[in-house]
Image (cartoon, rainbow, N blue to C red):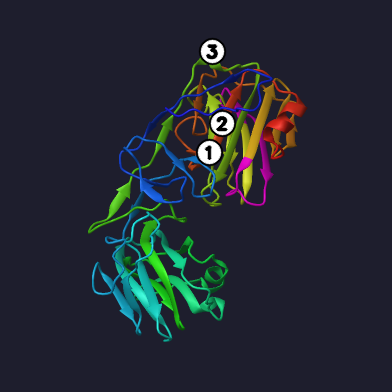
Amino acid sequence: GSSFKIDNLSVKEIQEADFTFARNSSATRVNQAGLIEASQSNDTPRLDYTTGQGAFLLEPQRTNLITFSEDLISGSGGTSTQNGILTESSTLEDPTGNTNAVTYTNPGNNNGSLKKSVTVSADVNLVLSIFIKKTSDSNFSSNDKARLEMFSNTASTSPTLLGDLINQATVGQWVRYSTTAVADSDGGSVVCALRTDEAYSFDIFGFQLEEGTFATSYIPTVGSTVTRSAETSVGSGNSDLFNDSEGVLYGEISALADDGTYRAFAICDNSSSNRIYLGFGNGSNQLRLEMTASSSAQVILTHNVSDTKEFQKLAVRYKTNDVSFYVNGLEVGTDTNATIPTGLDTLKFTSGSTGSILYARTKNMSVFKEELTALELEKLTSWRD
């Protein structure tokens, strides 16, 4: 199992929480050296460093619909090029630490492109992503000179413009770019394209097309689609580890996307009838606290931040008629008329039952069996040393 605890605060009792983790497939992570690597086993939790900070990563099930994700040379792996684009094997390191990247070169033509065609279902959300490494100090003349897009015979999406982003990138650093679209009502063949309009060269790696609204961790493919199964981190603990009368629930989490879906962690009675949960709400960049006792909502507090994809420290202090919500060192909400739920015996990466799974990055999660003072909560959730 995986455990989370606060290491620098010992003023109150802190209980470690052990979880049973499962994923019925392989997966990749970004390791501490910044390289993509495969997980050691299907049931190995991923400590991921995509953001530069190690965090426990939980993701939903996704399938890479591109069948040769790293074969990006024209004429092989279903790859084609248009208007003079040249693709050849690169000698530079790819995002996995190997040399499987491809150098993409536009000799100076308009609407040059690298393309792969993929069959998709009708009316589904799609997200296309690719890794690009800027290999010289040269820049695109404008933002629209590099584009990532999807189109079919009946519709074309608005491309994501990459020119300014590539110009701002560090030479020699791999950056992942993505774009989204909705398949039309006919579904069928969709063309995934990287386009440029002027003389430029950079390295590319890892085309991925998946159903969803945001890109997830890289899924390599060699000749067929590949699915990474949804991950679960099943609840832990028992009634001895929690206090129905008073306590604190704390977590440091970042969202995978600001997509308006509930994602939460909770102490509960292994259901949504009695629970205290923290996480992301259905509003843009919204954090949410909810407390339910005997299936009756007691407390609902929300707080908006600038970007939930950045790590947020949030905590709830609970006691009958005394509930406080803390975010990033500040008390952002209170409730003085709350009944505390009973039967709390489980800590879960959900909102209580099986829904609202905390697909996110988690750096810390703790349960305190006693109330903390306002000063202690400010310290616990503050970003100051």
Which residue is painted at 51% across and 67% down in the image?
Answer: 171
Q: Residue at x 75, y 24 (%)?
A: 373
Q: Around disc 1, counting alpha carbons within 10 Å, would you say few (fewer than 14), some (14 to 19), or many (20 or more)?
A: many
Residue 154 can be seen, yes or no: no
Q: Quickly name the residue at label 2.
A: 365
Name the residue beneath numbered marker 3. Answer: 240
Horizontal side, residue 28 vs residue 304: left or right: left
Residue lying farthest to the front in this orientation: 91
Q: Position of residue 301 (x, y in %)?
A: 68, 37
Left or right: 28 in relation to 296: left
Mark 1 secondary-structure assignment: strand
* Amino acid type at image mark 2: Met
In magenta segment, residue 294 = yes
User: Which residue position holds label 1?
Assistant: 362
Identify the image quadrant of the N terminus.
top left
* 3D distance between C-alphas at marks 3 and 2: 18 Å
Instruction: Reply yes or no: does residue 371 show up in magenta.
Output: no
Q: CA distance from mark 1 to mark 3?
A: 24 Å
In this view, 3 is above or below 150: above
Residue 357, position in %: x, y? 47, 38
What stretch of residues is rendered in magenta? 291-312
- Residue 205: x and y in percent read 37, 63
At 65% across and 16% down in the image, what residue appears?
Answer: 245
Helix, strand or loop at label 2? It is: strand
- From the image, which quarter does the C terminus lie in? top right
**Residue in the foreground of this view, choosing between 296 and 85:** 85
Which structural element holds mark 3?
helix
For badge 3, the amino acid type reads: Asp
**Number of marks in picture:** 3
Task: Please report contact status of discs 2 and 1: CB closer than 8 Å, yes or no.
Answer: yes
158 with respect to 284 (left or right): left
